Every structure is written in C-alpha cells, then in structure tokens.
Image: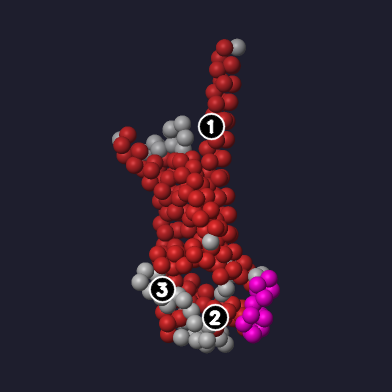
Amino acid sequence: MKALNFCLSALLGIALFFFILTASISLPIYFRSFYYMQIDDLNLEEESGYTEAQIIEAYDEVLDYLVLGKEFGTGDMPYSESGKSHFADCKVLFDLNLGVLIASTAIIVILFALEKFKVINILSGSHKPWFYTGIISVIALTSIALLASADFEKAFEVFHYIFFLGKDNWAFNPFTDEIIYVLPQEFFMNCAILIGSAMVFGFAACITADVLENKLTKKATCNENENQIG
C-alpha cells in the first residue's frame, strides 16, 4: 500500500504539472481579447494593409478552425494549401492541449476525492506533491526562459523544428499567406510571456501553499503542546 501511495503521489504531482502547463497555454488561445488589444500596439493595420475589422475576422476564422473545428478560412486574406496544412498541424497540438488539460483535471479531482474519503493516503508527507512539482518546474522554466530571452527568434525556430518535425510549411510566404502579416513574431513572443508568467504564478502558488500549510500545522502543534503542558 505504501508503494501504491507513493506512485499515486507522483501521479498527482505530474498531473498538477500538466494542468498548470495546459491551463497556461489555454490563456492566449481561449481569451481572444489578448490578440485584439495588440492590433494597435503591433501596428497590424499598417503592416498588413487590412482594417482592424478584417484582421479580427481573419483571426477569428483561424481560431474557430483550431478550437471549434469549423471550416478553415482567413477572412479576406488569401492563403495557400501549404499554409492551410500548417494550421491543420497546429490543430492537432490545440486538440492535444485540450485533451491533456481535461485528463489532468480529471486525475487531480479523482485523487483528491480518494484522499478525502480515505481510500488512499498521499498527502501525509512533510511536503505535499505540489511542492516538489513547483520547485522542479520553476527551476526548469527559469532555465528555458533565460535561453529563450537570449534569442527568441532562434527559440521560435527550435520550437517549430521540434513540434513540426520534418516539415517546413510553418515558414509562411507572405505573398501567398497574408495571414502572416497579422500574426507577427512579436505576438507569439507576447503569448510566450503570458504563458510563462501564468506558469510561474501557478508553480509559485504550489510552493507557497505547501510552505504556509506547514507553518500553520507547526503552529497548531505548538499551541496544542502548550495547552497540554498548561
């Protein structure tokens, strides 16, 4: 039973990591206002030659395809079959992110329910699973952030080489896929900053929650001992 509890505790830590990761990635995906408010800041009308309404329409059609599975389109902007195929590859990643978010949430809920009804005992250690998840993740995330900030363009390329292995359709030709004019690298950098910030907040919250709980537990124990002595 001890070995099972250890494995389930590790599973909880892993599920928490993937929950925070996928929830953070979901922020720029599902909150479209994050893109809308950057249209002026990134001078997208001037860069593309399209109006703000046309830019929003193009972005919404792409997101509707990626998130809702609607027919692919880029508003008034022309696109190539190569460009369309890249968005099809992106849709696989979007669907994967949602699937992992749902699965990790389910695992967390089930494990906490089993713990609450005393079917398992995975929260009895000096530190809870989310403490170790937070520590390891913050260290790893900080290292990645430092590397990416040194050369975001290179990091952007490496990301595509890893997640779109063997493909080059992500390198859009602006003459055939004008959507690239309204999806500049600066926008994706801002997405990365938002995602990274959300992850740091989530993992820091895990560490803080564990530290505060330990302090409250120790304080309660001290008070109980003092009352017994008194």
State if disc 2 and disc 1 touch (CB < 8 Å): no
The residue type indicated by label 2 comes to Ile
Counting from the top left corner in percent of width and height, residue 32 is at 59, 69
Counting from the top left corner in percent of width and height, residue 15 is at 42, 50
State if disc 3 and disc 1 touch (CB < 8 Å): no
Counting from the top left corner in percent of width and height, residue 137 is at 48, 48
Query: For the residue labelled by badge 2, is the local secondary structure a helix, a strand or a loop?
Result: helix
Disc 2 target residue: 179
Q: Report how far apart the C-alphas of labels 1 and 3 lie in the structure.
A: 45 Å
Q: Report how far apart the C-alphas of labels 3 and 2 lie in the structure.
A: 16 Å
Query: For the residue labelled by badge 1, is the local secondary structure a helix, a strand or a loop?
Result: helix
Disc 3 target residue: 89
* Sequence-first disc among 1 and 3: 3
- Nearer to the camera, 29 or 102: 29
Disc 1 target residue: 214
- The residue lying furthest to the top in this view is 230
Residue in the image at 41% along x and 73% along y: 89
Residue 42 belongs to magenta span: yes
Chosen colour scheme: secondary structure
